[in-house]
Image: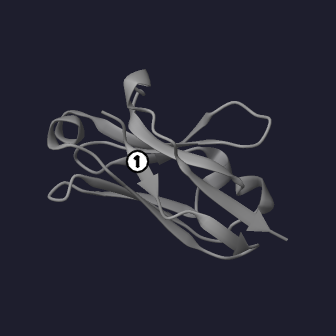
Amino acid sequence: VQLQASGGGLVQVGGSLSLSCSASGSIFRANNMAWYRRAPGKQREWVAFITSDGSAEYRGSVKGRFTISRDNGKNTVYLQMSNLKPEDTAVYYCNSYPYDSRLWGQGTLVTVSS
């Protein structure tokens, strides 16, 4: 089972995008969920996570610009991104938190153009 993220695309600096990721009920209910990203030439990094009861944490560089949320009824996790910067360009993935290596999907590409 892999988690498939969607919603990426090309956006200008300062723009917004919303990503989504659906999981099976068994994965979603049992886990904190998170968004990760891998920028060109860099290692994958954690972006934000949300607990099963909705508490969220963010890495410093996205705090105040990104919002993670989850819909437990739809088994879906979202990442609302605003005020995007060129350094946000990356392939974005969702996974549990901590991640499960079996769940990595192909991710969705976000490109922020200046």
Tell me the crowding category of disc 1: few under 14, some 14 to 19, or many 20 or more residues within 10 angstroms, Cα based.
Answer: some
Q: How is the image coloured?
A: one colour
Q: Residue under circle 1?
A: 4
Residue at 71% x, 61% y: name it.
111
Which sits in the foreground, 2 or 54? 2
Side of 49 relative to 40 (left or right): left
Q: Secondary structure at mark 1?
A: strand
Which sits in the foreground, 109 or 39? 109
Image location (x, y in percent) of residue 105: 45, 39
Residue at 40% x, 47% y: name it.
4
Residue at 40% x, 37% y: name it.
95
Looking at numbered disc 1 in the image, what kind of residue is underneath it? Gln
Side of 17 relative to 69 (left or right): right
The correct choice, above or below, for 31 with respect to 22 in the image is above
Q: Residue 42's image quarter?
A: top right
Image location (x, y in percent) of residue 10: 68, 69
Image location (x, y in percent) of residue 25: 16, 43
Residue at 69% x, 73% y: name it.
11
